[in-house]
Image (cartoon, rainbow, N blue to C red):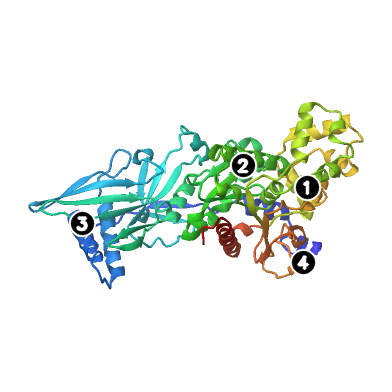
Amino acid sequence: MQLRCLFSTRPILLWVIGCLMTTGCHRPVVVRTVTTRTAPAAEALERVQKAWEAICEPGVTNLSVLMQGYNNGVLDLLRTWPRGARGQFLAREFADGDHRFSVDVQWAVPDFSPNYFDQFFLAEALRYQGLRHYDPTGWGQPLIALATNRGTLPEETYFPPEGIVRSLTATMEFPKVEGRAKTARLVIYEPDRQPEITVGGRHMTLAADFSAAYAYLLSRTQLKGYGLRAFLNRKTFGREAGIFLMEPYRPDKIPVLMVHGLASSPLAWAELTDALWSNPVLRSHYQVWHYFYPTTFPYLHSAAELHDNLEEIREYFDPQHESPALTNMVIVGHSMGGLLARRLITDSGDAVWTNAFSRPLEQLNCSEVERSTLRRYFYFHATPGIGRVIFLATPHRGSDLAAGWEGRIGRALADQNPEFAEFFRSIALRNPYAMTMRMRTWSAKKRLSSVQVLSSENPVLRAMAELPFSPGVKAHSILGDRGRKLGPESCDGVVTYRSGHLDQADSERIVPSGHDVNRHPEAIAETLRILHQHWREYSERIGTGG
């Protein structure tokens, strides 16, 4: 089985290419603006009003045709609509012979004022590649609003530095009035908050292009190749690490926290995030969070940081612990990110420590600061609030490639954190017989790296693999086999089935993918299925229905 995994792919730099390149590099999202000819505003306004009045009549049989005419007319109006200094839509008037038509602008977006945003775009005018486009069919015209993240508000520290992007919808409404004066309203809605409105007694789903909004945000990012560059040179990791909210916090929506893997970045979740947001049921029940961290650190350090970040964000948004959604979070982890997720749902007891040290922590010859650091890494409790974890291509028992010549190449390329190697060497020198033999051998290596700790020979990783999950937490495993249908003998090129399999898992799915299983359509579909299941079970517990 091991030989099949090692030699059935290209024989050179398997670890580096198979893991670093597939997880660290992602297709760029390119966005461009197109210009389209438009009808005169007065003509467009007349078409929109006639369609509105017809739809408001009882017994309409050609609703889809009327909707199309209405939407096309609104689009023509928006293309020439007067804007303010920051792109806001302004009130306007139309002249039709002796009649004047006044149009006010109504802002129906509860989370933000119109002046919060710096730019507004018509989603229809954007063309992009590198991300699937989900159909935004509905009532009105989708807009994209962009706000620069200036970091002036406390919650903005949890938003992406590229900016705050929201999907909005513009509609025209015509209240009934008497006399010669005519009025209308251009109403801007936030479909994530209000997915439908009532028109003529009918419930109309608002058109919303979440794909275009997300694509525009991704086109502004500098993360393309960032994770790999930071892996090769940790000094290039100049961004703030932490949890980033991809939408304003909502206490009624369950967080889905996505944790990327080795030499990667949140771009690893572009396809999954887009698919989740484009599903109206999941979008109404979940909010997307991304964790971004430098992968040059050993994973126990990154996992401890993630635990602290989660505790901090829960205290900020829910200091009274009143939100039931924050007691049922879902963690999705890919590759090494799955190991971070596993740390969040287990209690270490003494198991991790005793696999590394043969002497109790309190008896070590070390400072209190060093003792506190060791305790943080080797003794931990499950993070509260997590209800489910989805592991994607996670090497729970390590990777034989990390222990072999491929791993040596990876360790040679990976930038090091010398303070970690020096820390453990210093502990070993002052406590020559306190570490287990395996731990002494491992910590004596000159290059302690994030690749090295993923080795199947790592005693700490072996101990972690045997820890039970916290009671009540459900887990799912999605693995790749490169389409070879080898079952228990399969391998995604980096992680074998035997390393990724979990006896404790509530479900397991093998998809025809390499190590970048996080981007495979079947894996994404399985993840969405699990999220639907999680919501159904959660809603039954709290009595809200499906």
Q: Residue at x 66, y 65 (%)?
A: 509
Front in this rendered view, residue 492 or 35: 492
Query: Which dot, 3 or 1, sits closer to the camera?
Result: 3
Q: How many marks?
A: 4
Specify whether 249 is left or right of 315.
left
**In the structure shown, which secondary structural element does the residue marked by tag 4 occupy?**
helix
Which dot marks residue 119? none
Residue beneath disc 3: 45
First of labels 2, 3 by sequence position: 3
**Which quadrant of the view contains residue 53?**
bottom left
The span from disc 3 to disc 1 (Cα, nearest Å) is 68 Å
Disc 3 is placed on an element classified as helix
Q: Position of residue 431 (x, y in %)?
A: 89, 32
Disc 2 designates what residue? 310
Q: Give the CA distance from mark 4 to mark 1.
A: 24 Å
Few, some or many C-alpha atoms within 10 Å of disc 4 (few <14, some 14-19, many ≥20)? some
10 Å crowding of disc 1: few (<14), some (14-19), many (20+): some
Name the amino acid, label 4.
Glu
Q: Specify the farthest residue to the right.
A: 433
Q: Position of residue 110 (x, y in %)?
A: 39, 45
Vertical placement of 260 versus 369: above or below?
below
Residue type (three-letter) at the residue carrying disc 1: Arg
Residue 265 rendering spot, x and y as whole percentages: 59, 47
- The N terminus, quarter of image: bottom right
According to the picture, the residue beneath numbered tag 1 turns out to be 408
Q: Earlier in the sequence, mark 4 or mark 1?
A: 1
